[in-house]
Image: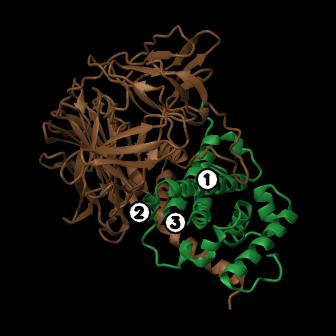
Amino acid sequence: MEPTLLPVTGDGGFEAVYRSEVHALSALAASLVGDPERGAEIAHEALLRAFRSGQKVGHMDRPGAWVRRVTINLAIDATRRRRREARMAPRLLASASPEGSPAGVGVDDPFWHAVRGLPERQRAIVALRYVEDMSLEDIARTLEIAVGTVKSALNAAKATLAFQLGEEEDADGHH
Amino acid sequence: MDTIDEHGRRAAAAVREQVRPFVRDAAELNGLVEAPARRTLWWTVAAAAVVVAIALTAFFATRDGRSVTDPVDSVPSTDASSTTAAGTPAKVPSSGIVLLVPTSDSASAIDTTVHGVAPRFVSDMFDDGTVVSQPDSTSIVVQEPGGSRRVLATAQGDGAESLALWDAGVADGRKVVLYGFVPADKVANSTPDGQPYELHTIGADGSDDALVFQNGGGAFVQSASLMGGTVHVLLNVLTEGEQYVIMGGTSVGPIGTRLDPTTYSSADGTVQAVFTGQTIRLQRLSGGEVTIQWGDDRPTLSSVELESNRMIVNVADGAPFLVDGLFDGAPAVTRLPDSATAARFVLAADAPDLNPTIDCTWTGAVVMGDGAMGSHYTTLSLTNSTDRPCVAPMVTGGALQTANGLVGLRFDRDLMTTPLPPIVAPGQAVDVITQTSSNYDVCGAIAPVPATQVILQIERRDPVTIDVVGDTIDAACGGSVSQAISLPG
């Protein structure tokens, strides 16, 4: 019995998916968890899940959407876990904070701090919107939700962000 | 004033740049898979990465609530009530590691003081490992309790780990660089005074279990989503400057956790396992498998081309995945339990010689470099041509001599290997893969002349010179050349 793994090479193979997606997925996860290294780990995890899921993913029309949903789920789970740890051992959280990045840059940008305070769905939509530069339609297809839902959630998120950051909210949510 | 869109796009661009260093190794792997000759290595790396990923899954896993979407919810959950070998009620986790170890005469305590295990060659050596981490380095030492053998796992700056075996406090010359992980059922960190910490797990069935690091100076509790007794130490996520250290009661460093309270590797070569209603498939990457299917009243087992007497099998997500094994052609010997809820199976037909020699003769071949992404790879295939088990050879360095006398290639800092078994059986070959950067690329401008010799430093012996005959380096760079060698024993 052969393992149900994606083929390594060839169109749609793990290698191709890996190459095309690993950076984007790492950035997507990093923006959500606030840690570039952890983000990369999550991206690898998501890609390897795709690898292990083999034919199921290989036969999907949009394997990239699948792996993005896994990435988002893992990132949100990691955030939940981190918050739980913070309740149990605050000193651990402090000691485990990502280091090496200038304050206010990248994942530490106030924008992402504010994003990480949003409801989970809004968080995911904002990350896909800006990190992946996705249109509303692409976000909807990725998350398998209605375009209208995406638009309303994004507008709500932007209103919250504008309030928290003291910035102007853009007029529309279209890309 | 920025708009949200402007700020968001600018912040996103910074994040994209910020993550690049952390996927660098992935780019190197991409280069590896381009070469068919590297396929085996790729599979190995992928397998190791899968384990890392699974450990991360356990690390990240939460059991409360749903995510935005749940595309992986088709993965079957395997949680089920069951009983440990000792009769203690426990839960079978949805993920775990099964360690199959060779037969040994010594007894094993199946509790929290179980194995310190490094993959591929430690699981057979430590019945009750104490893991000690150097307080000033990214390293972990697995020490045989009451004995002298120990393993040192050290994180390298590029994400690799080096493992070195010691006996009686002296390095025996065996060093393996891994792209992988070091699992351990028991982890402890030494404090500056040398007193080891012991790691225990509590809360055997909850999502808020804890790791307890304890030494003579007190205990420190770190929360973790555990369900049992196995701990994965993910050295490969360490980088230089990071330390897995306990200091002043504060634990830092990435720790992946894994737990399976009902599966234990014991010293007599058996695995105590409880898998109610599951199919455990132990599969080789190269094909062949053994399937253990629990039916209504008793398990059945079938095997195909089972050649391993030691395997590490990941059963996460209900999809067992062979992590590693020692394949020496031994037939499977399986003793099936009568109980459907407490299985005990043996896959150790012939225990390996645990006292292999390092005084071996190796027949080698060198396949000159290919590669991508600015790196070139040279494979050194070394076959144990003696009639006794040998410790896997350690190539500590080497160079490539060009026709004009230049040493155009040095790879003493960039050795990779396919997973080396703990012991190389007679006739068994192992591959050592060297990597060089383009700065030392003999196929490029640095030394654009034919290479005539490969000079290897194997263990601590005098360098061995391998003549490259019958071809030029230009041809070798485009194809391959092989040259039989005999290395002095």
Q: Nearer the viewer, mark 1 or mark 2?
A: 2
Which one is in front, B318 or B457? B318
Across and down, in percent, residue A175 comes to 79, 76
Q: Residue at coordinates 53% horizontally, 56% vertically from top-left?
A: A87
Secondary structure of the residue carrying numbered label 3: helix
**Residue pointed to by mark 3:** A36
**Residue pointed to by mark 2:** A95
Of all chains, the one bearing label 3 is A
Of all chains, the one bearing label 1 is A
Q: Colour of chain A?
A: green
Q: Is residue A2 above or below residue A85?
A: above
The answer to which of marks 1 and 2 sits earlier in the sequence is: 1
Q: Are marks 2 and 3 in contact (CB under 8 Å)?
A: no
Residue A77 disc label: 1
What amino acid does circle 3 point to?
A: Pro
Which one is in front, B423 or B374? B423
For residue B340, what is the image quadrant?
top right
